[in-house]
Image (tube, coloured by chain):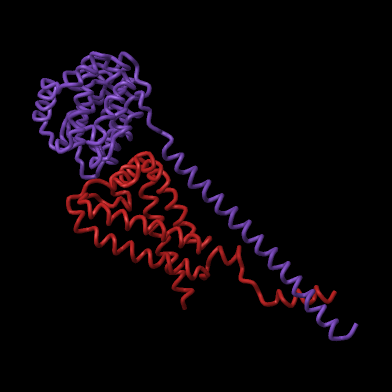
Chain colours: A purple, B red
Amino acid sequence: MSKQSREQSRTERAAAVRAAQARKERNRRLALVAGIVVLLGAIVAGGAWYGGRGGNDATGGSQGAETVVAGDAWLKVGDPDAPVKVVVYEDFLCPYCRELEVSTRDFLRENADKGRVYVEYHPINLLRQYDYSAKAMNAWAAVLKHASPQDALKLHNLFFDKQPYEQEADGHIGDIEGWVKDVVGNDSKVLDAMKSQDTSFFATAQQAMTDDNIDSTPTVFLNGKELPNTGGVPQMVSAIESAVEQGGK
Amino acid sequence: MLRWLGLIARVVLGGVWLWAGLAKLPHPDTSVSAVRAYQLLPAGLAETVGHVLPMLEVVLGACLVVGLLVRFSGALSALLLVAFIVGMISVWSRGIEINCGCFGDGGPNPNASSQYPWEIARDTGLLALSLFLAWLPRTPVSVDNLLFPPVEPSKSKEADVEAKS
């Protein structure tokens, strides 16, 4: 073998070794990147799961049958003599009422069952520019009057869990009957009552709104004192939780 | 010089993502509300995005600050910022007045229309930093430099030695 061909052979072998090293390094980097991406993805997924683990229970959570009572145009949950009283004015279409409801539902239900808080839910028809708001409230009135308070609480929860966007809401009016049926089945009294607006129920709700000077939702009264909404829903939630945990002191 | 600018971009951008994510983490339902307020995504998807976003922002911010997978992080950051800019232009054009929810500050805002241009400008600036990092990911003081060191020229000499043996 000539010197030239020996040189050529050596160069080719060196190129092959370099290619193999480059391939090995590329594979190592790819495996490392994939591993890191999977690990970071798992951290994000774990964090998201942890944040959302409270979940939404449209069936009304753990309320005891004896703790839910129908009011004139509202629902009473818990012992009226509990040390903390929370009154919530809410519109079934109001997105921040939804946030308040989802953020406080389990906490209030759990503590109402323990006799630590009494809650009144006052659905009102504030967002009158959308027919959905009145239709949902009317359906809720029918369930409150003709089915059980527990069913009214379930529908209340379901309306917030299924809440459509405001700008699309009137396209979801047809869904309301289905959600009512999910709660009370084919109860003809309820379904018949939904066909026309319950004017006396709306008048009672309106009167309660006027009496308490309600002009926005959610409005929350904690032991008779209106919570400021300057800090948004998180601040309301904190105030409620602190009051209940301190036993109304 | 550009590499040091990259380091500054990483720290600024990572800090903003960390701030945004940490502000949202304690209030996942508020994060969901903020995403729903844009009225863009289907309700179920908005809920998932609202829960995923805070943690994603924290992890993305941390990756940028420590310099881990900088090209990937810069590209992801750019994608998120494009989505936020599109979301803001969309609510602005539909006359929906909300806080952007960027730093856990969702909720209605009657003066939102006057703030949208500034928020869009801010996100466009951050988008520029993200694209810069995706283009030039090799920056000083980064984990990437430890995990993925630049290929050294001496490797070819080693190959020659191996070939001779």
Q: Nearer the viewer, residue B31 or B79?
A: B79
- In this rendering, would A36 be left or right of B30? right
- In this rendering, would B64 be left or right of A81? right
Q: Position of residue A57 (x, y in %)?
A: 38, 28
Q: Nearer the viewer, residue B101 or A22?
A: A22
Instruction: Please name the residue shown 23% across and 35% down the image.
Output: A93
Residue A214 figure quarter:
top left
| Residue lying farthest to the right in this orientation | A1
Query: Relative to A190, is B130 above or below?
Result: below
Total label count?
A: 0
- In this rendering, would B141 be left or right of B125? right
Q: Position of residue A33 (x, y in %)?
A: 58, 57
Instruction: Please name the residue shown 34% across and 22% down the image.
Output: A182
Instruction: Please name the residue shown 55% across and 53% down the image.
Output: A37
Q: Nearer the viewer, residue A89 or A200?
A: A200
Residue A142 figure quarter:
top left
Residue B113 figure quarter:
bottom left
Query: Relative to A79, is B146 above or below?
Result: below
Quadrant occupied by the C terminus of chain B: bottom right
Q: Position of residue A122 (x, y in %)?
A: 20, 27
Q: Position of residue B31 (x, y in %)?
A: 34, 45
Instruction: Please name the residue shown 40% across and 62% down the image.
Output: B13
